[in-house]
Image (cartoon, rainbow, N blue to C red):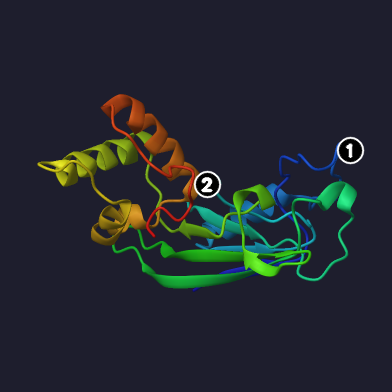
Amino acid sequence: IKIFVLHHHQVNYLDQTFTESDLSVMSNAQGLIDVLSSKGIDFVVHGHKHIPRFGMQIPTPGHPLWILCAGSFSAMLDSRHFESVGNKFHLVEFHDRCKKNKYARGVVRSWTHASGRGWMKSKSESMLDYKHSFGTYEPLPALKEKIIEIINKELSGKQYIWWSTISEKYEDIRYVGNRMLTDILKEIRKDMGILLHDIENSDLDE
């Protein structure tokens, strides 16, 4: 597993917490991201930015980068800016490599510290879901087509199915990122005329 750890953020994140411009992003960040992609880095972790995020980028060299902005673990966060964010810690699980494209696959689990309640599973309103899968990337239309095909197959002769059934049977689907998966399922709901319960729940497989 090739993990790259650094302090400053190399992504200029969309910031809904502060109104002023963020001038602390790394200089020549795009150059670094291209190098990491060309070297086939599996996972990037950085700090500095106190607001945690997790996402994927596909730089010009073509190898996707999964980037965890860790947030803070024990900072006194100004409630004017960080009321809904809180301190965080994360566990990153690397499960295996995809046989087809060799991407490292796994799950990031995150916990948030809440005043009076202590550590608890993260929720999306605290800027990061409790669980994020990573390691699968396919173009959106191809992935959507694959999921429709799977749902039709699994629903045949049944009134309902659990997402956990699909997640357990199909490895490619198990490691699709939260945002991409949720967006696809919302589209499929309209296209197929089916009901999807708990679609906003990041633990769909549980």
Residue found at x 34% / y 63%: 98
Residue found at x 44% / y 41%: 182
Q: In the displayed structure, does residue 167 sit left or right of residue 204?
A: left
Q: Position of residue 25 (x, y in %)?
A: 79, 50
Q: Which residue is mark 1?
A: 20
Q: Nearer the viewer, residue 138 or 15?
A: 15
Q: Which residue is mark 2?
A: 58
Residue found at x 39% / y 60%: 206
Q: In the displayed structure, does residue 56 sit left or right of residue 20?
A: left
The amino acid sitting under disc 2 is Ile
**Residue 42 visible:** no
- Are there few (<14), some (14-19), or many (20+) residues within 10 Å of tag 2? some
**Which quarter of the picture shows residue 129?**
bottom right
Q: Nearer the viewer, residue 30 or 178?
A: 178
Q: Position of residue 123 (x, y in %)?
A: 61, 54
The amino acid sitting under disc 1 is Glu
Tag of residue 189:
none
User: Callout 2: helix, strand or loop?
Assistant: loop
**Which quarter of the picture shows residue 185?**
top left
- Above or below — where is 49 with respect to 156? below
User: Callout 1: helix, strand or loop?
Assistant: loop
Q: Position of residue 157 (x, y in %)?
A: 9, 42
Q: Position of residue 149 (x, y in %)?
A: 20, 39
Residue found at x 88% / y 64%: 76
